[in-house]
Image: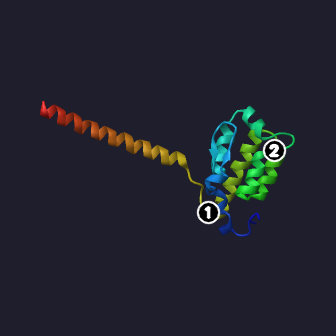
Amino acid sequence: MARKILFSKDINPILMDVVPKHEFNIHMGTSIKNLQELAEALEIMNDGAFKHHVTKDRNDFSNWVRNVIEDISLSKNLLKAKTREKSFKLVSQRIKQIEKLSGHPARDKTGFFTNELFIGLLLGLILGFLISAIIQGLI
């Protein structure tokens, strides 16, 4: 049964990752586990991949959002969207709306990966200098 959004405390789970068996496997070969990843995929996927999931007779994105994410409102809006761009806009707007209502922004993976990359580069540089200094000192 779909959960109904009544209070802001009920909204945040919509932004969370789904369990692995309920991930959405899109035609491009990517697995999607939350609305943020769906927005990212819709933004970059080609029209062929989009048309594979959205036809005159079905809308896989709408179905997944309704049955797995349990966001009836977004599901209904996606059902009306016939283009990748419109679907991306709807999902992005819904994420912003949920974040505003819940007071909790969705995870920003870009910042995480940027920080992780920076720390890795910094550690690599430091270790490189140390190893170089040790080798030069031993020769």
The residue that mark 2 highlights is: 81
Residue 98: image location, x then y, percent: 68, 59
Q: Amino acid at mark 1?
A: Gly
Give the structural element (helix, strand or loop) at label 2: loop
Query: How far is the residue under mark 1 from the one under mark 2?
Result: 28 Å
Give the structural element (helix, strand or loop) at label 1: loop
Q: Is residue 15 left or right of residue 134?
A: right
Q: Is residue 137 left or right of residue 34?
A: left
The residue that mark 1 highlights is: 103
Residue 37: image location, x then y, percent: 63, 47
Q: Which residue is pictured at 71% across the width and 49% down the height?
A: 91
Foreground label between 1 and 2: 2
Q: Amino acid at mark 2?
A: Ala
Q: Are marks 1 and 2 in contact (CB under 8 Å)?
A: no
The image shows residue 22, relative to residue 126, as above or below, that is below
Q: Which residue is pictured at 71% across the width and 51% down the height?
A: 93
